[in-house]
Amino acid sequence: MAEKHLFMSVIIIVIIITGISGYRTCQGREKECGANRRPNCLEKNREPYFQCTPRSQRCDSAWLSYCHAFYALSCHDGSTYCDCYCMPSPWEKRMPRRSSSRRISRTSS
């Protein structure tokens, strides 16, 4: 539970820092999408992604397939643009594959 609170704190700090610095990946790109659509940006592994999505659609729904297992998705859901971040989840660790202790032996006939 403490790890979840730590992760949420990190997300909030990232959103605050990006807001203070004025860095928004989609802010100012509203003209690229036309009426009833808004720019929706995602940053994953420091790589930017962009698409126009309907204003009625939640920001995170556009990126769920990009940000899946072992990642957490956080979005600033603005009325005119969306900024989303896909970050490695601190509480999910990739487990190494177990090697099978049983081996199938083949006998030649």
Image: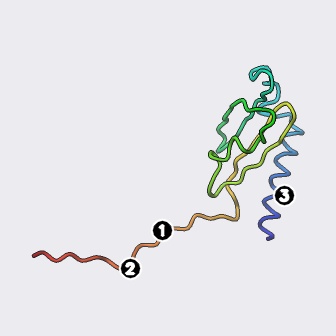
Q: Position of residue 71 (x, y in %)?
A: 66, 54
Residue bearing mark 3: 9
Q: Position of residue 19 (x, y in %)?
A: 87, 39
Residue shown at 65% from the left, 48% from the top: 67
Q: Position of residue 105 (x, y in %)?
A: 24, 77
For the residues bearing labels 3 and 1, Cβ distance under 8 angstroms? no
Which amino acid lies under the numbered mark 3 shown in the image of this protein? Ser
Q: Quadrant of residue 56?
A: top right
Q: Quadrant of residue 2?
A: bottom right
Q: Position of residue 40 (x, y in %)?
A: 74, 34
Residue at mark 3 to residue at mark 1: CA–CA distance: 31 Å
For the residues bearing labels 1 and 2, Cβ distance under 8 angstroms? no
Residue bearing mark 1: 97
For the residues bearing labels 2 and 3, Cβ distance under 8 angstroms? no
Pointer 2 or 3: first along the chain: 3
Residue bearing mark 2: 101
Give above or below for 29 relative to 70: above
Which amino acid lies under the numbered mark 1 shown in the image of this protein? Arg
103 lies left or right of 96: left
Give above or below for 104 relative to 16: below
Quadrant showing the C terminus: bottom left
- Name the secondary structure under disc 3: helix
